[in-house]
């Protein structure tokens, strides 16, 4: 255990010389997470199907925080594509210490009406894609002394919605699978020094939340103890903890960052 001297807590959170890959690397939440890691000194690679968006975000990160950052294309449901982005991250950054699995998909509809292609799309991205990224990252981390994997789940993994509040059975089911996958991988890889945790955000003011009808947004806010949606940067604290040595004794856990949505 490190000696408790002035500054030791802030030092635990530093990520200087660390290298991270964020899948689902476009959008406000991805940029907030990349900014969090970069602010702590970490180099960042961003990957999604829309490479141009990732490249734009990476340029902002590099300019703002003075770290190396780049974007690239990735189809998270295709193993060859996932393997390639992990390899490119290792090549361009010199290694891979932190993986953040943020890629996600949803499909709206009543379960009796959802086409199989909708169910499969969500599972391919949210479950299979998360597994593929975890395993290819681990194949680098294990022989190199360990690393950190953080899967982005959802408060939906712990909730079941009535039709008037949400018709997202494939999404919530897939995120529940991510929670269990996180626990399983933590148990499998602990002996190799790979910590695996998840963050389960609640309703954040970005992405899927913005597509909801106004009445559903109002109902959702009414079910949150803090009475509002979260900001993307309100995930930063949990991310910084789990990515850094401040969370060195944490693995197999899912951290809810939901404003009390799961307890309302």
Image (spheres, helix red, strand yellow):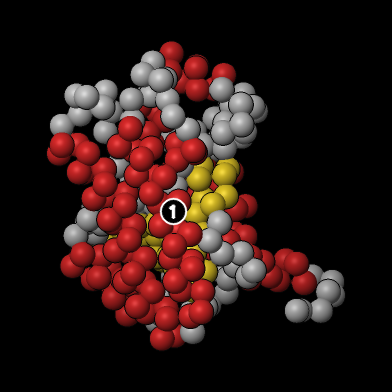
Which residue is nearer to you in this view: 263 or 32? 263
Visible in this render: residue 33? Answer: no
Is 26 situated above or below 44? above
Image quadrant for the N terminus?
A: bottom right
**Residue found 45% across the figure and 40% down from its top:** 157
Residue depicted at 49% across the width and 84% down the height: 145
Q: Residue at x 79, y 70 (%)?
A: 7
- The residue at the far right in this view is 5
The quarter of the rendered structure image containing the C terminus is top right
Q: Is residue 209 left or right of residue 2?
A: left
Residue annotated with mark 1: 180
Q: Residues within 10 Å of mark 1 (few under 14, many from 20)?
A: some
Does 50 sit left or right of 18 as displayed?
A: left
Tell me how many marks there are: 1
Q: How far across and how far down the image is residue 92, in percent?
A: 34, 77
Quarter of the image where one finds residue 142: bottom left
Q: Residue furthest top?
A: 215
């Amino acid at each position: 255990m490190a000696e408790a001297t002035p500054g030791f807590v802030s030092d635990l959170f530093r990520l200087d010389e660390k290298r991270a890959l964020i899948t689902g690397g476009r959008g406000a939440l991805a940029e907030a997470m990349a900014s969090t890691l970069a602010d702590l000194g970490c180099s960042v690679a961003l990957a999604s199907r829309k490479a141009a968006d990732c490249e734009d975000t990476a340029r902002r990160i590099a300019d703002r925080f003075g770290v190396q950052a780049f974007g690239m294309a990735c189809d998270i449901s295709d193993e060859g594509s996932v393997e390639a982005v992990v390899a490119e991250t290792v090549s361009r950054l010199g290694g891979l210490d932190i993986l953040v699995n943020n890629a996600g998909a949803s499909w709206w509809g009543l379960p009796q009406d959802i086409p199989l292609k909708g169910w499969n799309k969500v599972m391919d991205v949210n479950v299979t894609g998360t597994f593929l990224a975890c395993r290819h990252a681990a194949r680098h981390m294990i022989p190199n002394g360990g690393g950190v994997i953080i899967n982005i789940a959802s408060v939906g993994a712990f909730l079941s919605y009535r039709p008037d509040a949400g018709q997202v059975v494939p999404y919530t089911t897939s995120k529940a699978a991510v929670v269990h996958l996180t626990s399983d991988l933590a148990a499998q890889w602990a002996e190799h020094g790979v910590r695996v945790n998840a963050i389960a955000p609640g309703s954040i003011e970005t992405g899927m939340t913005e597509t909801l009808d106004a009445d559903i947004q109002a109902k959702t806010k009414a079910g949150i103890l803090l009475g509002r949606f979260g900001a993307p940067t309100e995930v930063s604290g949990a991310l910084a903890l789990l990515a850094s040595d401040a969370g060195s004794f944490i693995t197999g856990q899912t951290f809810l960052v939901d404003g009390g949505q799961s307890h309302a």
